[in-house]
Image (cartoon, helix red, strand yellow):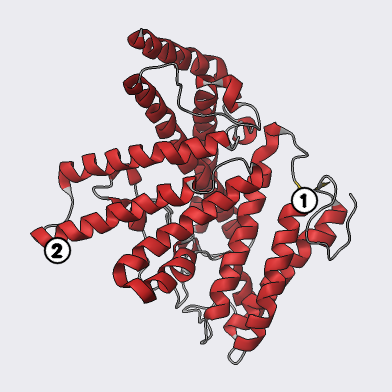
Amino acid sequence: MSTDILGLLPTSPTLPFDTYTLAVHILPVFLSFYVVAVLVILSGTHMLRIALCPLVIFLAFRATTFVDSFCRDSQWAQLNIGFALVMLFIVMRTLEWMFLKDPLKRHVKSASLILIDALDLTMNVRGVGWNWSKGLRLPPETRPTSRPLFAVYVLLSAIYHSFICGVLHIAIQTFAPEAFTVLSGGTIFDDTLPPLIRYIRSSIISTLALLAIYSAIQMNYDVGAFVGVTVIQQDPAQWPPLFDEPWKATSLRDFWSYRWHQLVRRSFITLGGWPIGFVFGRVGYILGSFLASGILHHIVIALHNRSVEWWNMPLSFGMMAVAVIIEQMFTRMTGNKVGGWIGRVWTIAWLLIWGNMMVDGFARAGLFASSSAFGTAALTKGIVAHYVTALDKWLRMCAS
């Protein structure tokens, strides 16, 4: 690859992940991010953090554009997606810390060393045990609290969710193997079907995709918890539950602000909610937070496939903000919160309407082309494909 260490964009195909790219492109990102984490704990470092922020952004951008984790092999496309998410996470956290004037404080210290606290800060995305987690609601704890039993529980949970993710991924690809198994991607909407059947079919695919995303996130979180508790010797309390049965949500606010994961909640609020909210008040705060989420999701799919329209993700997530604002207006006008079975129907309907657009963006970006997580569901491929194919044929019969 023709380039130099300070080059902004590669002038020839990207480099594979190896010792060279690890040392020259990847490690500098994590080291500079760690330095900023140390500084944000110390007082009087505001200007230093501002000075380092452009460097971290540059290094993260360079690593994302130069390093190809899967060498254009569609079976391992999720590695590049995961790598891009990590780089974006580093950029968002660095920008967030740049704006802070007061140092962050840890409520309960596992050691007196600032370096240990800084390491925890780089991995602690929800602020558990820190003073910046204000307003965060955590799901109730139902897992074992002793270290050995907790480790076994999260390990089994990781294996289970890996299997479920694999089954759902096989099901999604079976609906349209010619579109969902190639990097160029394809739409979830079949134009050969009448509108009603077409939308029912796309909604089934979208629901499977949402459950697969849920399983994949939970699986990765469980792996992180297992490593944190067994290798780093963290307390299980530092890894509280991630989801709270999102399928039981009775409003869009309930779904997005509590039941769905809150891993990047703080970054979305800092980068989108606060700036726009400062100008437009509470409505701007809600809209800005969701738009920040939409922009992040677009960046992720654009790094994978630049042919996807720029407005897809911001519009989809922006409409989630509209729904939350409508719910608040309803509460002000009636004095009642959105809830009950009507609230659940409303939530499912709105998620399906705009979730179809989100999932279609993922599909057309080729994100379904990667292999199933760890291949744990490979043995079920024939069974899953058989029933999904039968369902697809039945839907097409209904359309004829």
Q: Tell me the number on the disc at residue 67.
A: 1
Furthest-left residue in this view: 334
Asked whether the viewer can see residue 142, the reply is no
Label 1: element kind: strand
Q: At 44% from the left edge and 58% from the top edge, which residue is drawn?
A: 291
Which percent across, then down, holds residue 79?
67, 44
Which percent across, then down, holds residue 398?
33, 10
Which percent across, then down, holds residue 298?
54, 50
Which percent across, then down, holds residue 222?
53, 49
101 to the left or right of 286: right
Which image quadrant: the C terminus? top left
Q: At 34% from the left edge and 38% from the top edge, which residue is drawn?
A: 353
Amino acid type at mark 1: Val
The local crowd at label 2, few if under 14, some if 14 to 19, many if 20 or more residues have their Cα within 10 Å, is few
Amino acid type at mark 2: Arg
Does 116 appear above or below 223? below
Measured Cα–Cα span from mark 1 to mark 2: 50 Å
193 to the left or right of 213: left
Q: At 72% from the left edge and 73% from the top edge, which residue is drawn?
A: 55
Q: At 53% from the left edge and 85% from the top edge, which residue is drawn?
A: 103
Give the residue number, with chain letter if any, for mark 2: 332
Q: Nearer the viewer, mark 1 or mark 2?
A: 2
Does 59 appear above or below 183? below
Furthest-bottom residue in this view: 44
Asked whether the viewer can see residue 313, the reply is yes
